[in-house]
Amino acid sequence: MKKFLIKIVPYFVAVLIVLAILGSFADGNTDDNYMHFSVKKPQNIILGDSRGSQGVVPGVLKNKLSTNFDNFSLNIVESPYGQVYFKALKRKLDPETKNGTFILTVSPWNLSLNKSIKEEKDFPEEHSPLNDMYFYDQSPNYEYLLKHYTRSWFKIYTERAELGRSNTFLHQDGWLEVNINMHRDSVAVRTNKKELFYEGLANTVELSPERLKAINEMINYLRTKGKVYLVRLPTSKGLITIENRKYPAFNKLLKDIARKQNVKFFDFSGNYSEYDYTDGNHLYKESSRKITGRIADSILVSRGR
């Protein structure tokens, strides 16, 4: 046995070295989440689901507000408002933050929950990387790769951004840039599928008291570290119709939260015709830059500048 161990150790060490080298090439092409866990902890942050991930561009905010931002939005399954997201936020945010700017993108869906779920242990985000990651500012982040990268690590090297960005590229600042066929017919097909999905979803979910409690706790936490802004992003006419039919009082709910918490609420959902969408649900990247500029302008106006 001893001789066997002596012989196998060099191979084991060699494998570790190879994996360490391959992991060092992880970047925005690796997957849609990796970069969230491999950059410096931010003091200004954007929260939400995939609408926020694709729809709010930190670079535009930086140009208008003269400070760096990090988009820490994932998707509706992995980062709906809840205790898992709250825990992750506290690990992600720079603990020295004192004068930050925090943009919380809110939709009916990231405050909702399937009606059949009764216990928090069954919430979908329990399986999110946000629930089991400890390190949020390591590069390379081998913890993330070991826990959540399920493909061959050789793919990390062969598909690195240096050789060409993927169709979904996660920037270092957390913006998920999506490049997709924007021909009218292709967009129409994707939009129809998305509308059917949300029509079905509307039949299975309701606003969640646990999620409403969590977003209020997150706002309370962030208010001690800076200014908080609630934002409802635009979607296509079909999607906003579904939302307003399911949740006719949703804007009033957000206004009430903003009033009680003494924070600002910016509603852009009524201006849906001014923007382009990849699938009716997510803003196309040029429209993302446009709406982000308007968010920044609204923040400046609220500050009296």
Image (cartoon, helix red, strand yellow):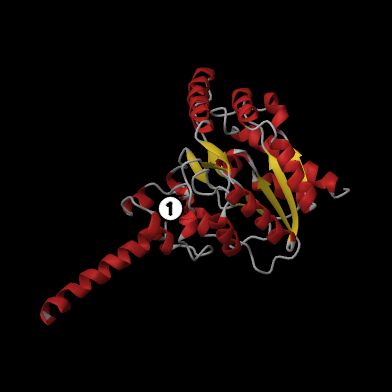
The 10 Å Cα crowd at callout 1, few under 14, some 14 to 19, many 20 or more, is some
State the residue at coordinates (38%, 53%). Answer: 149
Hey, what amino acid is under mark 1?
His
In this view, the residue in front, 74 or 121, is 121
Q: Is residue 169 left or right of residue 304?
A: left
Query: What element does badge 1 sit on?
Result: helix
Mark 1 = which residue?
Answer: 127
| Residue at far right of view | 304
Q: Position of residue 84 (x, y in %)?
A: 53, 57
Compared with residue 61, is residue 273 higher up or lower down, i.e. above or below?
A: above
Q: Which quadrant of the rendered structure holds the N terminus?
A: bottom left
Compared with residue 132, is residue 55 higher up or lower down, i.e. above or below?
A: above
* Quarter of the rendering containing residue 88: bottom right
In this view, the residue in front, 190 or 219, is 219
Q: Position of residue 118 (x, y in %)?
A: 48, 48
The image shows a total of numbered marks equal to 1
Q: Is residue 148 left or right of residue 112?
A: left
State the residue at coordinates (57%, 31%). Answer: 281
Q: Position of residue 218 (x, y in %)?
A: 65, 56
One can see residue 70 in this view: no
Compared with residue 201, is residue 174 higher up or lower down, i.e. above or below?
A: below
| Residue at far bottom of view | 2
In this view, the residue in front, 210 or 65, is 210
Compared with residue 8, is residue 176 higher up or lower down, i.e. above or below?
A: above
One can see residue 163 in this view: yes
Q: Position of residue 119 (x, y in %)?
A: 48, 52
